[in-house]
Amino acid sequence: MKKYIIAGSVALLLVIGLVWVIVQNEPTSVSGGKEVAMAKDPVCGMEVSKKGSPSTVHMGKTFYFKSEGCKSRFNEDPMKYMNN
Ligand SMILES: [Zn+2]
């Protein structure tokens, strides 16, 4: 009987862990815009994830890019893209 209780507890912990992981992976931009996880690439206009995307800071604002190519194009002429 004790074995079943232990196995049950382990299974329950696994389920709780799984639910927790799913909740943690929810895109933060959906929850009221507290922290926006996505940004617009000013060069090509594509939506990019702030996490892991190339970024540069220009005049105190951080810009995110789909690729290093977009980033270097931005750095060549930031004013051209800043209002996008
Ligand atoms: Zn781009």
Image (cartoon, rainbow, N blue to C red):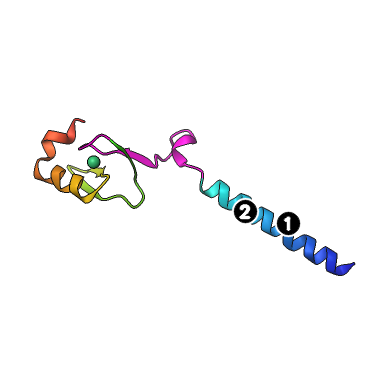
Task: Answer few, some or many: residues within 10 Å of disc 2's Cα (few below 14, many 20 plus, some between 14 and 19).
Answer: few
Find residue 64 and report its image quarter. top left
Is 3 placed left or right of 71 in the picture? right
Which residue extends farthest top? 83
**Residue at image mark 2:** 18
Range of the magenta residues? Answer: 26-45
Which residue extends farthest right? 1
Type of the residue with mark 2: Leu
Q: Which mark is residue 52?
A: none
Marks 1 and 2, the one that precedes in the sequence? 1
Type of the residue with mark 1: Leu
Task: Answer few, some or many: residues within 10 Å of disc 1's Cα (few below 14, many 20 plus, some between 14 and 19).
Answer: few
* Residue under the image location 68 percent in, 54 percent down: 15
Q: Is residue 24 magenta?
A: no
* Residue under the image location 14 percent in, 44 percent down: 73
**Residue at image mark 1:** 12
Dominant secondary structure of the magenta stretch? loop
- Which of 83/52 is in front? 52
Q: CA distance from mark 1 to mark 2?
A: 10 Å
Give the percent coordinates (x, y) of residue 9: 76, 61
Give the percent coordinates (x, y) of residue 3: 84, 69
Q: Quadrant of the N terminus?
A: bottom right
Q: Is residue 32 magenta?
A: yes
* Residue under the image location 21 percent in, 51 percent down: 68
Ligand 1 positioned in quadrant: top left
Which residue extends farthest left? 76
